[in-house]
Image (spheres, rainbow, N blue to C red):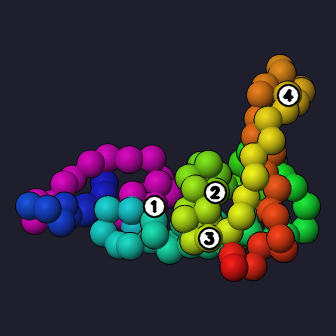
């Protein structure tokens, strides 16, 4: 059983969820964890881009960034010059068209 509140109308929601999942749901529902997580993902993605160009597939699988496209958009909005090159890769489960991101000018954002 999991109890958590809804900030919009102060309701308490009771729901049965899988063990271990209730804490995650509570964090998402009651805190600003998502924005903190996004900032951590942006930093992780930027650090990886400073080393090498990376694909969206790599960002999802190796860096554990669920929606890297959104993080790239946010990094661009911060002024980081990121170029997208499209390529096809074989993931072992099929061929997919993925974006490969390249950080230009060392990524200073200037």
Q: Is residue 47 visible?
A: yes
- The tag on residue 24 is 1
Q: Is residue 85 above or below residue 62?
A: above
N-terminal label among 4 and 3: 3
N-terminal label among 1 and 3: 1
Residue bearing the label numbered 3 = 79
Tag 3's secondary structure? loop
- The tag on residue 88 is 4
Label 2 or label 3, whichever lies nearer to me, is 3
Location of residue 88 by image quarter: top right
Say whether residue 22 is left or right of residue 44: left
Say whether residue 27 is left or right of residue 110: left
Q: Is the C terminus in the top left, top right, bottom left or bottom right quadrant? A: bottom right
Q: Is residue 94 above or below residue 75?
A: above
Q: Is residue 62 visible?
A: no
Q: Residue at x 25, y 63 (%)?
A: 4
Image spot of residue 85 (x, y percent): 80, 41
Tag 4's secondary structure? strand
Tag 1's secondary structure? helix
Bounds of the magenta span? 10-26
N-terminal label among 4 and 1: 1
Image spot of residue 63 (x, y percent): 76, 58
Image spot of residue 17 (x, y percent): 38, 47
Packing grade of label 1 (10 A; few <14, some 14-19, many >=20) is: few
Q: Nearer the viewer, residue 39 or 24?
A: 39
Q: Is residue 66 above or below residue 23?
A: above
Q: Assess whether mark 3 and mark 1 are in contact (beta carbons under 8 angstroms).
A: no
Q: Is residue 51 magenta?
A: no
Q: Residue at x 32, y 62 (%)?
A: 29
N-terminal label among 2 and 3: 2
């Amino acid at each position: 059983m999991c109890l958590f509140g809804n900030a919009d109308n102060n309701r308490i929601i009771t729901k049965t969820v899988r063990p271990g999942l209730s804490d995650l749901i509570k964090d998402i529902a009651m805190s600003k964890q998502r924005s903190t997580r996004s900032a951590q993902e942006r930093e992780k993605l930027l650090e990886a881009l400073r080393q090498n160009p990376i694909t969206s597939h790599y960002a999802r699988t190796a860096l554990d960034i669920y929606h890297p496209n959104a993080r790239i958009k946010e990094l661009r909005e911060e002024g980081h010059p990121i170029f997208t090159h499209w390529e096809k890769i074989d993931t072992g489960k099929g061929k997919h068209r993925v974006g490969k991101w390249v950080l230009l000018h060392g990524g200073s954002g200037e």
